[in-house]
Amino acid sequence: MNNQSCSLCTQKEETTIFSNDFCRLISTDDSFNLGVHRLIWNNHMSELSQLTKKNQIYLFDALIQAEKIVVKKYNPHKINVASIGNQVPHLHFHIIPRWITDPWWPYTIWSQIPKLEWNTFSTNVFNLEKMLVSVGDWPNLAKYSESIRKKVFIDDQKIIFSKQLDNYDLISRHALIKSSNIPLATGRMQPCGRLSRIAVIKEFRKKGLEKGILSLLELEAKRKKIKEISVNSEINNCEFYFKNGFSAIGPEFFKCNFIQQKMIKKLYY
């Protein structure tokens, strides 16, 4: 039995993963909810206890199936399963992939994202004065990082804009260096420990900012208990990573207009 006033009783404009007579799994994935899915019991009921014993078992089997689908596709560190329904009292479950690098970890995705903390570094590290650095999440640092990426990757290196877009920004940790509120250098660490999108404004290269970003991301990896970090380095930058404890692994490859080499570094605690 359906309730015409209930938004979950209808199936309008849903991205359906699987569906049957009893329930359906839909994706609510968007730029701010990567990989989030919703398992909905088709008939309008508000509580799990209202189902027959047989249907309770059926629903939990479907929930396990849904969890496996999300794990296989997104490879999260953890899955959160939540059934709330205070605003929409129709029986459903949220299946939420979580990463230790996502903005809300270890709290729920409905929690408030922590505010940024900016710290100063001594000039003997960065070779510049009045430097502020921060390691944080994409919602807080996006406006700074995007400004740097556009100048470095699109304007300087002529990389096609679409090749800069992926799903990792939201679930990565980001490092940023600025001076007088002008963003100068950025980089990110993905959930697997891969360092990417490392960029420094042209006028400020070879002044220690590359080392600064690398150090900030390595410290964050250690704080998150990540055992290994990696980076796909342009060939002419490999020496920089060798000097900072990285080793080359695998063959060279061509990507984004450059010959690159994968580099790895084991982290010890």
Image (spheres, grey):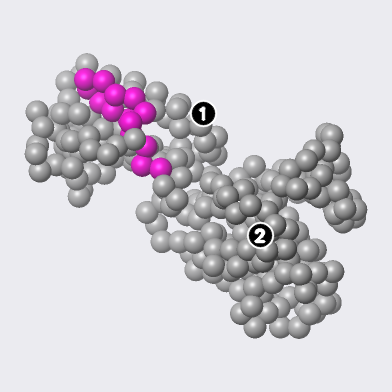
Q: Position of residue 13 (x, y in %)?
A: 27, 39
For residue 218, say whether it is visible.
yes
User: Which image quadrant is residue 11 in?
Assistant: top left
Q: Nearer the viewer, residue 179 or 201?
A: 201
Q: Earlier in the sequence, mark 2 or mark 1?
A: 1
Q: Main secondary structure of the magenta part?
A: strand
Residue pictured at 77% horizontal, 74% vertical: 203
Residue 71 located within the stretch drawn in magenta:
no
Does the magenta-highlighted stretch encompass residue 22? yes
- Alpha-carbon distance for marks 2 and 1? 33 Å
Q: Is residue 133 left or right of residue 242?
A: left
Characterize the local packing of mark 2: few (<14), some (14-19) or many (20 or more) Cα atoms within 10 angstroms.
Answer: some
- 134, above or below 268, in the image: below
Q: For this view, does 168 lie left or right of residue 205?
A: left
Q: Is residue 104 above or below residue 145?
A: above
- The circle on residue 152 is none
Which region of the structure is painted magenta? 16-29
Callout 2 secondary element: helix
Q: Which mark is residue 72?
A: 1
Q: Nearer the viewer, residue 237 or 266?
A: 237
Q: Residue at x 39, y 57 (%)?
A: 111
Relative vertical location of residue 72 with respect to residue 148 in this rendering, above or below: above
Q: How many marks?
A: 2
Label 2, on which residue?
154
Whether residue 223 can be seen here: no
* The quadrant where residue 151 appears: bottom right
Look at the numbered disc 1 and give the secondary structure of its residue.
helix
Q: Nearer the viewer, mark 2 or mark 1?
A: 2
Amino acid residing under circle 1:
Lys
Q: Amino acid at mark 2?
A: Ile
| Residue at image point 86% right, 41% down | 248
